[in-house]
Amino acid sequence: MLPKIIERDDLRAFVEALLADNVVVAPIRKGEKYVFSEVETFDEIALDYNISLLSPKKFFYPQIETVLKFKIGDRPESQAITEASPVIIFGIHPCDIAATWLLDEVFKEDPADPNYLEKRKKAVLIGLNCAQPCDEFSFCRDMGSYNVEEGFDLMLTDLGEKYFVEIGSKLGEEILVEGAHFRDATSGDLKDRQAYQEKKETNFVKRIPYDTKFLPEILEESYDSLVWDAIAKRCFSCGSCNIVCPTCYCFNVTDEVAASAAEGERKRVWDSCQLAEFTEVAGGEVFREERSSRLRHRFFRKGKWLLERYGKLGCVGCGRCDRNCLVKINSVEVYTQLAGEPVQ
Amino acid sequence: MTVEEKDRAAAIFKPETGRIVAARMLTETEKFFRVVLDHGGPLGHKPGQFVEVSIFGIGEAPISICSSPTQEDSFEMCVRNVGSVTNAMHQMGAGAEIGLRGPYGNGFDMEAMKGRDVLFVAGGLGMAPARGVIKYVLDKRHDFNIVTILYGAKNPSELLFKEDLEEWQARPDCDFHVTVDRPDDSWKGNTGVITTLFRNISNIDARNAWAVVVGPPVMYKYVILEALSIGIPESRILCSLERRMKCGVGKCGHCQISNVYVCKEGPVFTYSQIKRLREGI
Ligand SMILES: Cc1cc2nc3c(=O)[nH]c(=O)nc-3n(C[C@H](O)[C@H](O)[C@H](O)COP(=O)(O)OP(=O)(O)OC[C@H]3O[C@@H](n4cnc5c(N)ncnc54)[C@H](O)[C@@H]3O)c2cc1C
Ligand code: SF4
Ligand code: SF4
Ligand code: FES
C-alpha cells in the first residue's frame, strides 16, 4: 500500500477522530518518565517521549491476567476466560514493535494461547518512528530493531511540517479513512523521508563491538566464562530487568479465592528467571542455584536460545533492563566483555 | 483460526474433570489415585507423559501418569505430599472430583523399543513414571526382548507399589532387582545405592538395548555412567527429567533448559540430547 502524508496540524484531528469512538492508549508523561496509558485528549500524548517505563506489551499480556474462573466444591466447574477488547496503541516505537514479533511466535506456537492472541488481534498498532536513540542505554541499532518494516498497522515518521505515513495492514488502511486528512505521498515527500532516514542512520550508532549475528557463537563460547560470575557478583537477583523487558514472557500461575470460599480465579502473573525459586522443585533442588547461572540464563535466552527456537532474537536493545538495574548491570557491557573486549 | 484450533487454544488453562475412583496410601507420604474422566473416554496418554492436576482454589501440579495406556477405563497417579496441591490431593478419597489438563510431554517412544532388550532403572518416586512404562512393556510382553527392572529406594518403607513388585519378582519373563540404601531389621534383600544393582544384570545385549532411567536429579549422572559402561549407546539411554512447571505447554518458561522446554520436548530425553543441554543433569 502506497504511503500517505498527513500535515502536522491535521494530526490532532486524526487522533481526535480515533478518540471519539475507540479506546486509545499512548505515551504520557508521568513525573520524570513516560508510561503507556489510556488517553482522553490529544494533548495528553507525549509525542516526543523517548521510552516508556513498561512497553505496550502489557496490553496483550497484562502483568496479572485471569485465565480461568472456577467454582469450588463437590462438583468443581471452571470456565476459560479470554477477555479482549479493541484498543488502539498510538505512538509505539520501532523496538517495541519488534518485540511483538517474538511474543507473537511464542504465543502462536502450538498450543496457541488465546489470552494473548485475542488481545493482539484486537489491538491496532500506530507506530511512531524515532529520529534518534532514546538515550545512552539504547542499543537497538545493534539488535536491528531501530527500523521496522512490518508488525504495525500504521507507522508515522515526523518530517517537520508533515508526517509520513506507512501503511502496514488492511486495518491500517481502514483507520486512515476515519481521519480523511491524508493525501498520497509525492516524490517530494519520498525524498524527505529518504533524507530523514539518512540522518537517522548516522544518529544511531552500533555499540557492541561485533555484529550481533555472531551473538549465538560468542555466547556459546562463553558458557563457562568467569565473566558471568564477575557480573553476577553485583546482581541482586531482584528481577527488575525481566519485569521491564518487552520480550520477557515467563509467568507464574496462582489461584485466588473469593471471600465466599465457593469460587475464585486462576491468574497468570509475570515471573522472573532471576529469582532462585523459579526453578525450585519439591525436594529442594534448584536447577539454577548460582546467581551467575541465572544471569547467564537471561542473556542466553536473549541472544541465543529464543533465536534458535523461534527465529527471533530475544532482545530488541531497548535498554530498559539496564536503565532500571539498581547496580548498573549493562547489556552492552556484558556482550562486550564476553567477547574479550575492553568495556568503554 | 478454525473452530477446532480455537477449542484447543481455549483449552490451555481449562481443565477437564475426573473422578477419583480409588485412593490409598502406598507409604507414609505417597498416595495412590485411580481416576476416571467425566467424559468417559480414555486419557489417551503415552507412557512417560504427565497431567497437570488442578485443585481449584489451590493450584496445579504436574504429576506423572503411573498406569499404562493399555489400561483404558481409568488412569493412575502416585502423589507425594510435599506442598499445597499435593497435600490437598492427600485429603481426597474415592468420589472426589479433580481437574486435569493434559496429557502433556513427549513420553517414551515405545515403537522404537520394540524387539529390543529394555533395562529399567528407577529411583525413589521415579518408580511412578517408570511403572507406566513397565506395565506397558509387560502387557505387550511379546513385543520386547529381555526385560530387566532395577529399583532403589532410601529404605524399605519407601518402596512403592509393593503388589506390583511382588508380581514382577514372581514373573519368569522379567528380571527384577531391588535395593535400599538403609535397610531395617526385616529387610533381607540387597542394600546399597541403585548402581550396585548393575552387577545383577545378565544376558542383555547392551549394544541393542534401551535403558529407561527415572529418578531424583542426583541419580542420573551415576546411573548413566553405569549404563554407558555396560555398553548401552547414549542415544538409547532415556531419562525423564523433572523441572518446575507452571503451564505444561511451553509458555511459562519455568522448565526451560537451553533452547528446549522440558514440558514439551521432554520430559523424556536421550542422553545424547541431555549432554548437549548442559544444565540437563
Ligand atoms: C513432569 C513431572 C512429573 C512429576 N510427577 C510426579 C509424580 O508422579 N508424583 C509426585 O508426587 N510428584 C511429581 N512431580 C513433582 C510435583 O509436580 C511437585 O511435587 C508438585 O508440583 C508440588 O506442588 P505443591 O503445590 O504440592 O507444592 P508447593 O506448595 O507449590 O511447593 C512445595 C515444593 O514443591 C516445589 N514445586 C512447586 N511447584 C512445582 C512444580 N510445578 N513442579 C515441580 N516442583 C514444584 C516447590 O519448589 C517446593 O519445593 C512431577 C513433576 C514434574 C515436573
Ligand atoms: S535488574 Fe540488575 S540487579 Fe536486578 S536481577 Fe536484573 S541484572 Fe540483577
Ligand atoms: S533484554 Fe533489556 S534491552 Fe533487551 S529487550 Fe529486554 S529490556 Fe530491552
Ligand atoms: S511448564 Fe511452562 S514452559 Fe514448560
Image: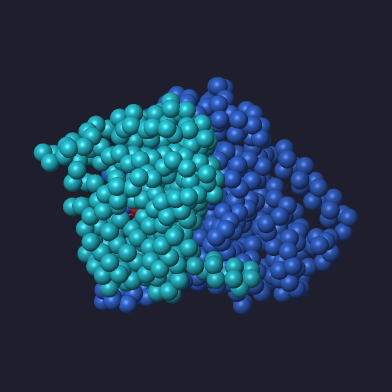
Q: From where the camera sits, is residue B15 visible? A: no
Q: How many labels does the image show?
A: 0
Chain represented in blue: A
Name the residue: 61% across, 73% down: B3
Query: Which residue is situated farthest in the front direction here?
Result: B172
Q: Which residue is drawn at 32% across and 41% down?
A: B176
Q: In this view, does A177 lie above or below A339?
A: below
- Using the image as rendered, state which of residue A180 and residue B278 is in the foreground: B278
- Please say if A331 is above or below A25: above
Colour that chain B carries in the picture: cyan
Give the left or right position of residue B59, taking residue B186 as reference. Answer: right
Q: In this view, does A152 lie to the left or right of B207?
A: right
The x, y position of residue B242, in whole percent, is 39, 45
Q: Which of B54 and B35 is in front in this view?
A: B35
Residue located 76% across and 70% down the image: A181
Q: Can residue B134 be seen in this view?
A: yes
In this view, B7 is above or below B261: below
Q: Where, by quadrant of the figure, is residue A290 drawn?
A: top left
Query: Which one is in front, B238 or A205?
Result: B238
Q: Where is residue A35 in the image (x, y as percent from the top left)?
A: 51, 57
Quadrant of the image containing the C terminus of chain A: top right
Q: Which residue is drawn at 84% across and 64% down?
A: A184
Q: Which of B206 and A133 is in front in this view?
A: B206
